[in-house]
Amino acid sequence: GHLTEDERRRSTIDVWGKVSGDLRKHVVDALDKQGPVHDMITSGARGSVVQLHQMVGMKGLITNPRGEIIEFPITSSLKEGLTPIEYFISTHGARKGLADTALNTARAGYLTRRLFDVAHDVVILEADCGTKDGVEIKRPGKENIGGSFADRVAGRVLAEEAGAFKRNALLNRDDAKAIEDDASIQAVIVRSPMKCKVARGVCQKCYGVDLASGELVDLGESVGVIAAQAIGEPGTQLTMRTFHTGGVATAGGDITMGLPRVEEVFESRTPKLPATIARVSGVIADIVKDGQETIITVVPTEGSAGKTAKAAKKDSEYRIHPLRSIVVKKGANIEKGDFLTDGSADLEELFLLAGKECAQEYIINEITRIYELQGVSTARKHLEIIVKQMFSRVSVVTGGDTGVSAGEIITDFELDRINKVAKTEGGEAAKAKQLLLGITEVSLTRASFLSAISFQNTPRKLAEAAVGGAVDRLVGLKENVIIGRLIPAGTGFAGSKKHQMIQDMEAGFAAEAPVDMPTTDRDRDRVER
């Protein structure tokens, strides 16, 4: 059959991408394992396999300034030297790289600021919150995202026993290696900041090891600020539209990558041409072409009782955009929330269909994948802290006897607190639905108005705080810095020697000079006279 121009172009790029990938494997295999180049790459001191491949394998495919892949590949390596036409093509990528670097720095800095604002009040507040929940960490699949199995579980605390290791055991590097070598263990459940029950913070057990010292994290450690900087700082190293051999084009045209994609995920924005996600569980009955589009028909296994004919049809028929590649086959069984095509998921849709845990895992994997394509590795626990904040808000559906009104956005811990109070007083509890918010939105829905107004939308947030008579409890770091108080973290953490010393000093001052402050206009007049 005849190919369309677009299909031919994509197939060509696909072939060259595969050739380049195969050649890269040969380059790595041929590399002297005792040599300095191997040492530099494996230690992470300089460069990655991508640069080595360009030097002695082939330079591969190049993107033009619009971010599209040029289908003419550069088959020469830099060691052999490029032909005039190859040299000319490579100038496209070089110019784009320089322009991106200039724009990138400001964009990465702004992302770091937003990450800091969303997580600054996440501090280690307790030794153990006592939760029995955890997150599942599986052995790496084909893509091998997030490092080896041992890398993923080292420095974490077990939520359930694994092999010879009991629940609540802190895994060091040797323990993690022992778990990796035990072929019977395919996944482990570890404690995670996302499951921590501490209000406004994290406990030592859910966080695990402090990556700087290799010891269990200290009480009062500002893990939120560390997470923001650990994710934001490598952002400057991500090119605007990451190009990695072949994969982008085969995945269907122009998929946003690099820093713009990191931003898109953290802000929970709808991507351009999102992936199609199954709305019901069932069996793929048919995949047929309809002009440019493809129609996938699913026969649901769950009943369509209570649904209108239109809604039932919407759940069973999916029209696929020509730029999206279908990843399922006819006759396959699918679950609600499974991907039917490639591409980036709309997080809101994934959250509604596949649930909170699936959406959280997708965010972590997506960010990790983007960073690793650039040879940058970020510890999973940093991402978990940001994801915890993205899922920390609920929208009140009915207020009950709690004093909150429908539509109000509050934290999940605040909801638990007011519901406990209502129940003890014999009242009706509030009902709320879980939200998934982008990092900017989370920062602007803080209980602390000082933190919110010093971030963005100052006039609006200040007016809202004034109208609502807001009270700032000064629990985060930012609001304490603003008014010149010691921050409630590090040496200022409640219970530390410095904190105790300051409290003693303040108590001493109060005892020395008792002052009657005028409280009414009459008192003030008396003082002035």
Image (cartoon, grey):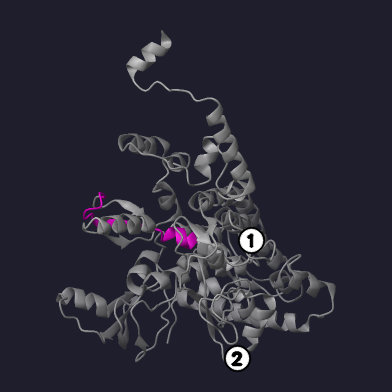
Q: Residue at x 45, y 42 (%)?
A: 456
Residue type marked 1: Gly
Can the viewer see residue 430? no
Residue type marked 2: Ala
Question: Which callout, 2 or 1, points to the residue nearer the camera?
Answer: 2
Q: Residue at x 46, y 70 (%)?
A: 131
Identify whether 523 is placed above or below 445: above
Q: Which residue carries the number 1 mark?
A: 93
Q: Is residue 494 magenta?
A: no
Sequence order check: which comes first, mark 2 or mark 1?
1
**Residue nearest the observer in this picture, 279 or 68:** 279
Task: Specify start and end residues of the magenta stretch as a single range.
Answer: 386-404
Q: Is residue 399 magenta?
A: yes
Q: How many marks?
A: 2
Percent coordinates x, y for residue 496 in the rendering: 61, 49
Percent coordinates x, y for residue 146 in the rendering: 59, 73
Q: Secondary structure at mark 1?
A: helix
- The residues tagged by marks 2 and 1 sit, at their Cα atoms, a distance apart of 44 Å
Q: Which residue carries the number 2 mark?
A: 183
Quadrant for residue 157, please give it. Answer: bottom right
Q: Are marks 2 and 1 in contact (CB under 8 Å)?
A: no
Quadrant for residue 246, please give it. Answer: bottom right
